[in-house]
Image (tube, grey):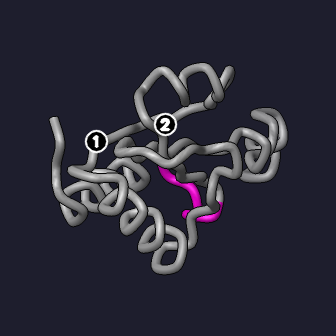
Amino acid sequence: MRINQSEIIDDIDAHIRKFGGDYSEWCVGTARDSTFFRQHLADPGEGLIYREAYTSYAADGVIERLVSGYGLRPDRASIRGNFVFVYRDVRTQPPKEEAVSAHV
């Protein structure tokens, strides 16, 4: 279901808050359809979410707001399309053992 820019940003922001972490740990991109990022992101880590915007221009606006306003990192392999996807980049997260020992 296609939704407007504000709804997409609100959904993504709520999703990131649910999974936690800094906004800079998350990547955002666009795609023509959902098969692109499912193939592109062999291991998307935790927290993959996607929403369909009305147009590719609207999707571009969402990307711009999430990158410049929230600090998400652009996914360099994304292709222009109506689907906005966000995932937590597992490369920015410490291994589980380090994360546990860092809090002790």
Q: Identify the amino acid type marked 1.
A: Glu
**Which residue occupies the extreme bottom position in the image?**
69
In whole angstroms, how far apart are the C-alphas of marks 1 and 2?
17 Å
Crowding at mark 2 (Cα within 10 Å: few <14, some 14-19, many 20+): some
Residue in view at x 31 percent, y 42 percent: 51
- Is residue 19 visible in the rendered structure shown here? no
Q: Which residue is mark 1?
A: 52
Which residue is labeled 2 in the image? 47
Image: 70 above or below 23: below
Q: Between residues 42 and 82, which one lies in front from this camera angle? A: 82
Whether residue 72 is situated above or below residue 88 in the rendered picture: below
User: Residue 53, position in %: x, y?
Assistant: 26, 49
Identify which residue is drawn at 69% across, 43% down: 77
Is 30 on the left-hand or right-hand side of 56?
A: right
- Among numbered discs 1 and 2, the one appearing first in the sequence: 2
Q: How many marks?
A: 2
Tell me which residue sits at (48%, 39%) in the image.
31
The percent position of residue 72, horizontal first and vertical second, equals 57, 64
Q: Which region is colored magenta? A: 19-24
